[in-house]
């Protein structure tokens, strides 16, 4: 259902307010029905957590919207018909992104291609060839515009490629890919979760990686070292129930050890474009790869949150992360009541969320 300008403005303001992440944003909309009402309620929620709270200033959001328009970008909200279906399935799906280009290519079957920044010449060539072959088969290639494998994948897939960046939509990163980023925005699709003007930080890259994995039915790692950020993307794909694939390499080359490790852990070994197409054709959420992270329970808490009273679970929390589903089981409270309590603690800055649906007390606030 279309939203009016006042609600769109309030949604952006809500997401930019302190301590509001994707999960809490969803909880607030479910509880209050609209972002305008949620923003009005934030100061009182903050008080319940024992802290004074101020939402993002209206002037800051007005400046952001003007910068988005100046960049030639648009906002996409989580409940828009154009919001990619597979991305919407993530518990941590970004509630709002900015974008430039052709949103229609996100509706095609998507495959993520990631790998080493300092990739070998052979892997660069292979990445470009795989991307070209996959787009010829009607797929869209998603990557993160990094040097090495990412850049080669985008180039081979052009124009059927989606670039997901860790900066604002108006910031080119890395600088040497400024021309490629602009080409993707003009011919393919460029997506950013961070507000315009935001320079990339270390914490932004895992967030970007979850979007890359979330857009695709499968992630292919072409070449990667054991501690590469590409393996984070692969693990996020596995956690989301998507296919995880890897191209094997020589055990003598450190840049291949990450791929070989993934294969040992259950990722599907692929050697050709046809292997990828066979795996992802008609993907319906049942991957063949055995590469998995521990799944967490997912709750449909929309109706329950609107009426729930917060559960008293603060004594159950510590600085050690624990799954929300475990809190619900141990407390004996309803899912809605636990989520309301967690929302209040997060808004007041006392709670930290972790991957895999886990939460902890914020260690930075502990004396």
Image (cartoon, rainbow, N blue to C red):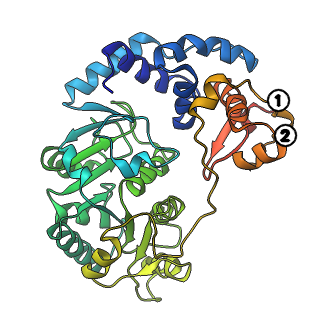
The quarter of the displayed image where residue 6 is located: top left
The correct choice, above or below, for 116 with respect to 262 in the image is above
The correct choice, above or below, for 116 with respect to 69 in the image is below
Q: Which residue is mark 1?
A: 312
Total numbered badges shown on the rendered structure: 2
Identify which residue, 363 or 84, lies in the foreground: 84
In the image as oriented, which residue stretches furthest toward the front?
A: 303
Q: Residue at x 41, y 77 (%)?
A: 246
Identify which residue, 59 or 101, lies in the foreground: 101
Q: Residue at x 78, y 30 (%)?
A: 311
Residue 264 percent coordinates (x, y): 54, 83
- Residue 115 in sight from this viewpoint: no
Q: Which residue is mark 2?
A: 316
Q: Residue at x 66, y 12 (%)?
A: 44
Residue 304 percent coordinates (x, y): 64, 31
Q: Is residue 75 left or right of residue 204?
A: left
Which quadrant of the figure contains the C terminus? top right
Q: Tell me, yes or no, whether the two marked residues, 1 and 2, touch with CB atoms within 8 Å.
A: no
The correct choice, above or below, for 65 with respect to 188 in the image is above
Q: Residue at x 22, y 64 (%)?
A: 139
- Give the distance between the C-alpha atoms of the residues marked 1 and 2, in whole angstroms: 9 Å
């Amino acid at each position: 259902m279309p939203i009016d300008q006042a609600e769109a403005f309030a949604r952006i303001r809500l997401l930019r307010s302190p301590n509001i992440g994707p999960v809490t944003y969803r909880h607030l909309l479910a509880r209050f029905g609209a972002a305008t009402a949620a923003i009005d309620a934030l100061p009182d929620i903050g008080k319940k957590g024992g802290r004074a709270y101020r939402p993002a200033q209206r002037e800051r959001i007005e400046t952001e919207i003007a910068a988005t328009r100046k960049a030639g970008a648009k906002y996409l909200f989580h409940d828009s018909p154009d919001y990619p279906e597979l991305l919407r399935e993530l518990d941590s799906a970004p509630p709002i992104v900015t974008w430039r280009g052709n949103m229609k290519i996100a509706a095609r079957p998507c495959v993520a291609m990631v790998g080493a920044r300092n990739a070998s010449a052979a892997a660069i060539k292979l990445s470009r060839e795989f991307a070209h072959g996959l787009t010829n088969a009607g797929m869209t290639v998603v990557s993160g515009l990094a040097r090495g494998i990412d850049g080669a994948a985008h180039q081979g897939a052009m124009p059927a490629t989606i670039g997901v960046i860790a900066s604002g939509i108006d910031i080119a990163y890395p600088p040497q890919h400024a021309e490629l980023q602009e080409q993707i925005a003009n011919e393919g699709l460029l997506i950013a979760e961070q507000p315009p003007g935001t320079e990339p930080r270390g914490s932004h890259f895992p967030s970007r990686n979850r979007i890359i994995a979330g857009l695709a039915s499968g992630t292919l790692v072409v070449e990667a070292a054991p501690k590469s950020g590409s393996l984070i993307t692969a693990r996020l794909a596995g956690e989301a129930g998507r296919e995880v694939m890897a191209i094997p390499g020589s055990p003598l080359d450190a840049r291949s050890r990450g791929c070989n490790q993934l294969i040992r852990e259950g990722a599907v070994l692929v050697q050709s474009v046809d292997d990828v197409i066979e795996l992802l054709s008609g993907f319906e959420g049942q991957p063949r790869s055995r590469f998995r992270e521990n799944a967490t329970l997912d709750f449909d808490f929309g109706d329950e949150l609107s009426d729930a009273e917060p559960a008293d679970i603060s004594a159950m929390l510590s600085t050690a992360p624990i799954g929300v589903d475990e809190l619900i089981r141990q407390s004996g409270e309803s899912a809605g009541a636990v989520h309301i309590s967690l929302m209040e603690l997060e808004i007041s800055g006392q709670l930290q969320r972790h991957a895999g649906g886990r939460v902890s007390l914020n260690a930075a606030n502990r004396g």
